[in-house]
Structure formats: structure tokens, C-alpha cells
Image: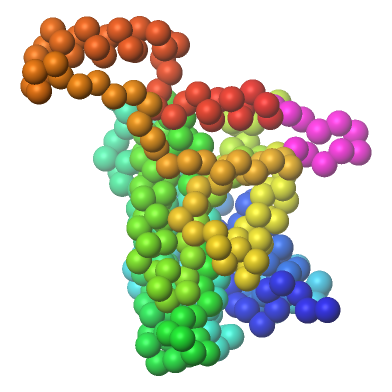
Amino acid sequence: MSLPLEGLSAVVTGAGRGLGRAEALELARLGAAVVVNDYGQPGRDGSGEASAAPADAVVAEIEAAGGRAVAHIGDVSDHEQARELVDLAVSAYGKLDILVNNAGILRDRMVFSMSEDEWDSVVRVHLKGHFNTVRFASAHWRARAKTGGGGGGGAVYGRIVNTSSEAFLAGSAGQPNYAAAKGGIVGLTTSCALALAKYGVTANAICPRARTRMTEDVFAGFAEPGDGERDPLAPEHVAPLVGYLASPAAAGVNGQLLVVHGGMVAVVERPRVAAKFDAAKGVFGFDELDEALSGYFAGRPPGETFGAAEVLGLRREA
């Protein structure tokens, strides 16, 4: 019996540790040949010297289990290094079929204290890093489709899985850079889903919740596992969804946002109108707006932000 991803190749960014590592191992377990990308810096803020050690270690794990993998030590926020990453997958495996974007850094600060560099660096790695790899992967798929490389019908096999965050959905007071980048990733994903569908490519985004180097302080003491139990916030709970979205079984899933953690997957709807007000004479004045909107918001919990209720509900269930 063949494996779900047998004969397919994948790139996973930020795959030297945490979620990316778990995702790379899962894709390999399902039969994919994997390019393990990681810049290897020791600091979660992107500080320190680049190192091949994290990516090489994951490649060794995959090979020890009988899989195929190569390492790429590169910064996906650099346009040319992202191009080289996609080119490596094509040269090593003949084509690229799956792109999983996971690389990121944190430089948390309240907005009134944040420096320009703290803003730029986080947006660059997360949002520009996602764009860079998608840019070259999508060009590869489009070129293959135009030359019949997909096996007929003008379509190829392509899967994009991008990584957003609940920080975008519910807000995160000390992470304006991170929340903005993660929101941008959702916009990028839905745009790509529409643009690339005709080539046979799907694009989806996940909001994973996992205990990793990036979130060690956020989840310290939260939902700790009991003796002999798997951590409910282990990255291994997220990886199977990535494997599914990367597979032929998910051909009908496109442009979606899914929250995932500890045995739970939630499909998030696109924003919808919660209330609508019409001006009595076709044009709103201040007093009429005050009466309509102040009355509406007076009945909502103080401090509740756009989209927060549903996500906070998921957090309470966790």
C-alpha cells in the first residue's frame, strides 16, 4: 500500500526545531522527500550566528527512519536565498509539490516602546519570508502547468500550507509586529488560493498552538501533561493536519484558515457582518451614529476585540 505523499517532494521552512521539525518528520513519514530549511540561529529573536546543526539533525532523523531529506541553511526573508531553496528542491527531487512555511522570529514589545527594527525584522521574516518562498514555488508550478509538466489538463500538483497565529485572530497586546505579520499571512494565503487554483495548487493557513522555543514563556505552566501523558501542546499534535493539507485527500480544501492544537481542529469562517445600521435620511450625522453604534457596543463585554469571542472560547475549551 502506497503512502499518502509517496512520490512527492516538500519544502518546510524553519524546520530545525519545534513545529517545523515535527511537520518535516510527518511529511517524510507519509512518504514525501523533504528539504529541511532552517537558518539555525540560537535566539528566538533571530540573534546569533547561523548554524547548519538544527537542519542537519532533522535530516539525519528522517534518513534514519528510511526517508529522503536534504538540508538548506538559509534565510527565507532574503529573496535570493528563498529562490535557492525552491531551486534546491527541484534539483534534488525533480520538482516541488508541497511548500510549508513555518520560519519566524519574535521581538515582542508594546507598540509605544517598539523600535523600527523590531517591527521590520518580524514582518520581514514572517510575512516577507512567506511571500518569498510562495513567489518562487508558484512560478515553478505555473511554468510546469504551461509546459504540460503536470500530466495534462494544464494543472500540476501544488500545496501551500502557511502558518498564521491566534495572535492575529484575538489580538496580542505585546506583539503588534507579530500579530500584523500573521494577519498579513492570511491575506496572502487567500489571495494565492484564488490565483493559483487554476494551476492545481491549493493554499491554506493554520493557526497552531504548541509548546516550542517560540512560546515557552507563553505556555509555561499551561496544560502541563501528567505522568506518562503526551503534552497536549506538543507540536506533534499539529503535524498531522499539515500532512493532510499537503496530501491529495485535501484537494477540495483551499483558501481556508484552521486553528489546531491537542487533538482539536477548528475551521475559521471569513469575517462576516455582525450588525448593520442604515441612516434614516441616507446620510449619517454624528448624533445618529452615536445612538446606533454606542448602543450596540454598550452591550458587548469591555475590552472585547474583533474576532476575540470565538477564539477565546476555543482557549477556554483547551
Residue 251 against residue 177 in the figure, above or below: below
- How many numbered badges does the structure rendering display? 0
- Please give the range of residues in magenta: 222-232
Q: Where 144 falls versus 265 (above or below)?
A: below
Q: Residue at x 65, y 43 (%)?
A: 265
The x, y position of residue 310, in whole percent, is 53, 28
- Tell me: 292 left or right of 310: left
What quarter of the picture does the C terminus occupy?
top right
* Residue 21 spot, x, y in % from top left: 65, 58
Camera-side residue of 25 and 289: 289
In magenta segment, residue 223: yes
Q: Residue furthest right?
A: 228
Q: Is-magenta flag for residue 105? A: no
The answer to whether 284 is drawn above or below residue 183 in the figure is above
Q: Which corner quadrant of the image does residue 77 belong to? A: bottom left
Q: Going by the image, does 312 lie left or right of 275?
A: right
**Residue 314: image x %, image y %?**
61, 30
Left or right: residue 255 versus residue 218 is left
Q: Quadrant of the N terminus?
A: bottom right
Could you say which is closer to the camera, residue 296 or residue 137? Answer: 296
